[in-house]
Image (cartoon, grey):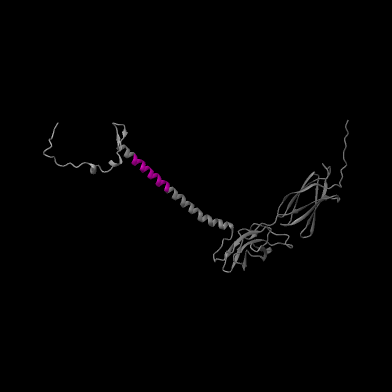
Amino acid sequence: DYVVVKMIPDNRLPPRHLHSVHTGKTFAVIKWESPYDSPDQDMLYAVAVKDLVRKTDKIYKVKTRNSTVEYTIKKLEPGGKYHVIVQLGNMSKESSMKINTVPLSAPDALKVITENDHILLFWKSLALKESNFNESRGYEIHMFDSLMNITAYLGNTTENFFKVSNLKIGHNYSFTVQARCLYSGQMCGKPATLLYDELGTGEDSSATKTGRSTDVAAIVVPVLFLLLVTLGIGFVVLYMRHRRLQNSFTAFANSHYSSRLGSAIFSSGDDLGDEDDEAPVITGFSDDVPMVIA
């Protein structure tokens, strides 16, 4: 025996499984499921977006019969903070979540040029790669002194360079440049960081770790190449000397080989030398010594 039971839809239930699918700089894709499975009619949802920075609200309406709903919230600001509320149009129970949009990118090619009594920071315009950035917003610059463990706000500018003075000898500094923060520092761009060592020796110090690595590589690579070439020449010289010694020994052994005995014959150390010097001196014959001719 069995019985079929059909549940009465309750429109007072909240949407289920509300979550963010993807978040960009100016948009966010959210997704949720209907309060109950397989709706038999269109359902009207109210999507309220509260800007936690600007303290403003926007409400969007979504009408669909799908059990799973995906919706894109547009016209958001980079680095913004939002509170999203989704509920049925009859003001039923709600589901909510918080969204933080992606901040503006960090400026590219940040570098330093050392002058006599100050330095200049340079970077590329952020408007070249960020369509949502206006140069009138400007940039703000911070400095961190690692020796004093102090972070200082140096100021802001609408240009692509900034002058820094009164640096102390022997101190290491970290400079950051980012899109100027809005609304009491709540909406900022990503910072670009540069390390700088004030050596105080009258020489230009390297501005970044990348620069230092490049300079070291420019010195080490030629030295290693010269060492390899020298080792190669040394191996060739040793090989040639070895071949000459081997050939000399072979020729010497062949010159002392006796085919009758089947072996090489070497004289003692006393017999070595010039054969002409060791040969006996022949003098004239005495009349008292008979000569025998066979």
- Residue 242 is a magenta residue: yes
Task: Name the one closer to the observer, 78 or 236.
Answer: 236
- Residue 223 is a magenta residue: no
At 58% from the left and 56% from the top, the residue drawn is 210
Numbered disc total:
0
Task: Name the one closer to the observer, 204 or 251.
Answer: 251
Residue that protrudes farthest toward the front in the picture: 288
Q: Position of residue 292 (x, y in %)?
A: 13, 33
Q: Position of residue 187 (x, y in %)?
A: 72, 59
In this rendering, the answer to whether 289 lies above or below 87 is above
Quarter of the image with the C terminus in it: top left
Q: Left or right: 286 with respect to 71?
A: left
Q: Left or right: 121 with respect to 253?
A: right
Task: Name the one closer to the observer, 269 or 205.
Answer: 269
Q: Position of residue 162 (x, y in %)?
A: 63, 65
Quarter of the image with the N terminus in it: top right
Q: Where is residue 242 in the image (x, y as percent from the top left)?
A: 38, 43
At 36% from the left and 43% from the top, the residue drawn is 245
What's the magenta bit mostly, secondary-structure-wise?
helix
Whether residue 56 can be seen here: yes
In this rendering, the answer to whether 237 lies above or below 180 is above
Whether residue 139 can be seen here: no
Q: What stretch is highlighted in magenta?
A: 234-249
Task: Name the one closer to the observer, 176 or 259.
Answer: 259
Residue 6 figure quarter: top right
